[in-house]
Each structure stands twice: as structure tokens, then as C-alpha cells.
Amino acid sequence: MGNDGYLPLFETKRANGRTLYRVFAGSIFVGICLIWSYRVSHVPRDGEDGRLVWIGLLAAELWFGFYWFLTQAHRWNLVYRQTFKDRLSHRYGNQLPGVDIFVCTADPVIEPPMMVINTVLSVMAYDYPPEKLSVYLSDDAGSQLTFYALLEASQFAKYWIPFCKKFNVEPRSPAAYLDSISISDDSKQPKELATINKLYEDMKNQVENVAKLGRLPEVHLRHKGFSEWDSYSSRHDHDTILQILIDGKDPNAKDSEGCVLPTLVYVAREKRQQYFHNFKAGAMNALIRVSSAISNGQIVLNVDCDMYSNNSLAVRDALCFFMDEKKGHEIAYVQFPQNFDNITKNELYSSSLRVISQVEFHGLDGYGGPLYIGTGCFHRRDTLCGRQFSREIHNEFKIDIPRDREREETTAVLEEKSKVLASCTYENNTEWGKEMGLKYGCPVEDVITGLSIQCRGWKSVYYNPERKAFLGVAPTTLAQILVQHKRWSEGDFQILLSKYSPAWFANGKISLGLQLGYCCYCLWATNCLAVLYYSIVPSLYLLRGIPLFPELSSPWFFPFAYVVISNYMYSLAEYLWNGGTVLGWWNDQRIWLYKRTSSYLLGFIDIIAKSLGLHSDSTFVITAKVSKQEVYRRYVKEIMEFGDSTPMFTALATIALINLVCLIGLMKKAIVNEGIPIIYETMLLQFVLCAILVLINWPLYQGLFFRKDNGKMPNYIAIKSIVLAVSSCTCFTLFST
């Protein structure tokens, strides 16, 4: 408490051990400089073997050192936040701002309606005054099935919301909650629990039966909302479809206990084939405009359709930052981490983003705030609409007009007026997608939007509560995770090359630490070149017996050994400290390699080709939220999935086989010529690098040679990779002598 009696609504604590880490990082930097010195001072003379490859290694190691320096922005100044919700309640009671919640979906097959409505129901049941809460579902597929599911959910909500509040249920996704308990438990609410379970199962069966039929029975089509589809041609050609399913200002909109319900709105923006719709960014901007006419909440939360609320108090956590009297006026958005409820024990595909969410974003928070990652983020509406920060700004949250006022217009009139805001032509000759709303023209519209907000002077906050605020569905196949990271790395690299690059656009507008942090992600794609070089060339030179690293007896050996061992020991300790397992860390290292030699490589090539006019604009690939039962069973058993056909598997398999051929060739040569002591003395580091690459690729070798299930590597990819790997090693051996 300050001298003026002020009690903050949140506090910020700096991480312990910062000085110790900085000393450690300094020692690593010295080691990196010594490695560079070794490379420069030992370049082979003209005409000597390995001169060009030596220069290539120098370039790779310069890049690794530079990128390591960038990553220090994530670890140099970690901070952690704590909120005081009791103070918020004591200070403001129910005098809280309106909150509009946006849920976006785009495909009823990849994103099943039952998953979508569970997310919608979870946020409708927030521990927040319902008259201040409005939920909008954007359906970019314009699916009757999704609308029908939401219509059913609007009826189920009348029972689910009072049940949640009566028994303080967590989580408030019906599927997640009912799956987490046993209905036969001797609990406090056996009758109510059985009733709510029956209502949910009835709703689920109805929605899934309609999905199997592929059409709606005539009895369901009687609702006036379905008449909106009379002019529907296809998902790419239809009028705006907008239905207010629950009008929060309607005095008759009550739940089963007679309490008011949150507003619930379905929106499928107008689509025409001659107009580019700008993917998720376009859908979000349409929702910003539509919601401004219906509820106009001063706080906007957006979540992906698979990201259900796991903490009903998350909205109050966010308001602790926005409504703090001394610091709240500086904050544009509050970003919660992206967590998942289907992660395996050892994180087979490193899908949890553990280090990013538990370490790196806390580091960015110490320099002015994290990136906006497109889900689980609370925004000030005015900052999304382009407002500049000014020190004269104070908290301007206004209390909504009471619900029981006489409505100025009917729901039907409001629906018709709002449809115009979601039309294809509304944004023509406006600043939408440029200076207002989410920005267009980039696969990662969220990151570039957050950066532009921070460059207007605003700060952001990262809040990672003990009880996770949101839980979603992580990719369950290797192909899904690689495609996802290709889109992310491609989009981030595109930002780097655009006018909004953090390297120059953000210069002087955000702190240097935050600028470096952004550059670290924007340079994901370019990592592919150095990693690809290091993953292939040293192993190939083993076949020729040409050492590329210092001998064991050389004093230059120690900087290499120190940097490598220290970095990996720190990485392991960091991973374990943040709740991971040893095998999980090993899986994380494997996916680190796979992303850089496939996802990032193809993303880098695509952006370069696009910059040269050789490639069309990127398409937005939706990550699948469901998988086949057979595939999911293998995922639960932590068996890697190679059954999909993708060129990224060809790249991974070829690199893995090159290293295997090189290691076998070296061992054969060493045994036949009795050269093991020589290899140990002269090429230990090179041998260890190749051996580790072989070990880390063991699941891939299983998929190529040993597995018989449908998750094995497709035969044509296996044959192609074997031919490429053997040909590469043979040609290198024959033509480089």
C-alpha cells in the first residue's frame, strides 16, 4: 500500500536468479566469440580440402551466435504477474464494463459444431454479470449445421449457466466438465447433475445425428433464422447471415432460475467470389463492427473455437489490469497463454509450447508486453480500432445503461441494421485492415496487429495464472504440427520483410528488448539455412575423413564443448523446471530439428518466391481439430505419425538417412582400418554430431523400416528418400575426391 492508501489491482515481480543467469549468458557469449575466432584463424588455404565448407560453417556459426543473442531478450528480464480480484470486487462491485467475446470458426468438418458450442457455452458461463456479457460466433463457412448447433446451445444455456453458478463448476465447458466426473459419484448435486447430463447428451445426439444426415429435418427448419439461407449459394457466395439468438436486453431472456442471460449472436459475414475475404482477420473485423452496433462492450475477448474457458474468473483477472487506477490506462491487451488439454505426458510433438509460454513470453512482458497470438486475448475495443496512446488518457470505462430500459429498436430491426456492417463492400475506401481492426495481408494477422498497437504507444500484459484460463486442442500428427509451424514461420518472416518489420518500423517506438524479441520470432524461417547446413555437411565430410572441428587435444576443443554442453544442460534444466519431463525435452529437441529442416525451410522458400513474384499469396490453412480414432490411439501411446503425404516428410527422411549412411560408413571404415583412436582424437565432435542426429531420428527410422501400421512412412516417400540419401552420399564421395 502506498502513502496515499492506493491498493493496486495487480503486482509485478521480477524473476529470481537474474544476475546468475546473466553471468552464465556472459560465459556462453565468450565461448561463442572463441568459436568464431577459431573459425576465422583456421580457414584452410586456397586449394586445401574443406575451404569452402569451412567458410560455410563459419557463416552457420555466426548465425547461431547472432540468433542466440536475440533469444536473450526472452530470458534477460522475466517478470510474473499476480492479480487481486478481491480488490476489484470490493472497489467496483458489479459496476464493470461490458465484455464482448468473439469465437471464430471456419469449417464444420475440421471444427465440429459440438466442439464450437462447448467453447461458446464455457464463455457464456463466465463469473461475470450476464447483462455485461455478449458472445458472438463468427461462422465463415455459413453452415446451417453450425447455426443449428448454436440454436440448440442457446436453449441448453438456460440450464447450464445457472447450474455452473449454483455449484461453482470448473471448467464450464459441458463436455470437459462432464468428462472429468462420474455421474454416479456421491456428490452434492446428484439430481441436478443427472438432469444436466441428460440435457447435454440429448443436445449432443441431436446435433451429431443432423451432422450424419447431412441435412436438417423439416421440423428444425421452422425457426425464422433458417430463412436466412434462402439466398445461400455456397460458403463463398451468400448474403450476410446474422441472428440474435439471445437478446440480452430482452426482459424475457431468462434462464431456468429466472436470471438474465448473456447476449448470443450468430454471424456469417457476406461472401462473394469477386471479393477477397481476408480469412480470420476479415472475420474479426466484421465482428468488431457488428458488436459495436449490438452491445459495444469496451473489452473484447477473442478465442479460437477449440479454446474453451477453463477458468470462469479469467475475465476478472483481465479487468484487474485494465481497471488499475495507476497503470491500467497504459494497457491495450492482456494475453493469456495457449494451453491444451490433449497433450501427452512426454509431449510427443512439443505441442504445448512449454518454453514459449512459461519462459519467453514472461521475458517479453518485462520489456513492454508479449505478442498478440490470436486467441485468449482481452483487448480494449478502442485500441483495436486504431486509437493512439496518450498520457492524458485515463480509465474511461463507462457503466452500461440498465437492462430494463425501454429498447429503442426491435431485435429484427437491429439485425437488419447490423448486417450492413458485415457486407463485402463495407470496408471499401476505409482504414479497416490498415489502421483499424486486425491488419490484412499476412498469415499471422494477430502478431502484426499486436505489434502495430504497441508501436502506437500502448503496453500489453502477459498473465499466466496457476489455473489455466483456456484449454484447446493441440495437433495430434506430425504433419499437422509441421504445417502449422510453416504458416507461423512464413507469416513471421513476411512481417520482417514488410513495412511493419520490427527491425525498422518498431525502431524507437518499442523497447529494444521487445524489438529483439519480435525479431527472434520473425527470423524463425531463416534458421533453416544454418541448421540444414549443420545437419548434412559435417556428416558427409565424415565419409572423407576430413575434420571440421578442433581435435580433442586442442585447446580450441573446449569452447565448442563448453557452449554445446552448457546450452543443452541449461535447456534441459529450464524444461524440467517448468514442468516437463526428460523424454519430453528430448522430443522437443527432435521437433526443433524437424521444424527447421522442413516447416521453416518451405516457409522460407515460399516467402522468397513470393517476393520475387514467383509465387501467389499464401492461403490460410486451418489446423484440424479432430483426428481418426486409429491415429488418436497412436498419439496417446506416443507413437509418431508418418501416414500423411507431404513433401516435408521427404526432406526429413532424406536428411535422417544421409546421417545414418554417413555414420555406418564411418564405423565400417574405422573397424576395417582400425581407425577408431584416430577418429576419437581428430573427429570426436563431428562424430558426436552425426551420432546425435541419428539417435534423434530413431522414430523416423522406425517409420521407414520397421513399422507395419498405417502410421508408417508412405512407401513412395521412403523409396524416394532412400534414393536421394544414397545418391547424395555416393556422389559426394566420388566427385569430391
Image (spheres, grey):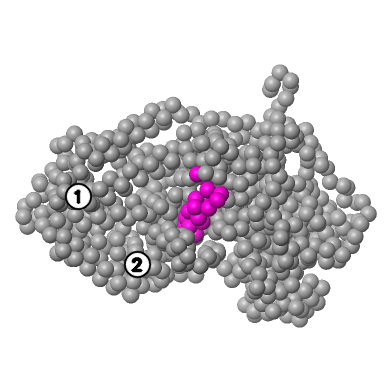
- Quarter of the rendering occupied by the N terminus: top right
Magenta stretch: includes residue 74: no
Extreme residue in the top direction: 3
Q: Is residue 153 left or right of residue 464?
A: right
Q: Which residue is mark 1?
A: 51
Sequence-earlier tag: 1 or 2:
1
Q: Which residue is mark 2?
A: 650
* Residue 384 rendering spot, x and y as whole percentages: 68, 49
Quadrant in which residue 26 is drawn: top left
Q: Residue at x 91, y 51 (%)?
A: 404
Residue at disc 1, secondary structure: helix
Q: Residue at x 44, y 45 (%)?
A: 580
The answer, for residue 94, to whether it is visible in the render is: no
- Quarter of the rendering occupied by the C terminus: bottom left
* Residue 344 rendering spot, x and y as whole percentages: 46, 55
Of tags 1 and 2, which is closer to the observer?
Answer: 1
Looking at the image, which is closer to me, 165 or 461? 461
Q: Is residue 288 left or right of residue 42?
A: right
Magenta stretch, residue numbers: 482-503
The answer, for residue 567, to whether it is visible in the render is: yes
Asked whether disc 1 touches disc 2, contact meaning CB atoms under 8 Å apart, the reply is no
Residue at disc 2, secondary structure: helix
Looking at the image, which is closer to me, 565 or 272? 272
* Residue 114 rendering spot, x and y as whole percentages: 64, 66
Magenta stretch, main secondary structure, is helix
Q: Is residue 252 left or right of residue 393?
A: right
Q: CA distance from mark 1 to mark 2?
A: 30 Å
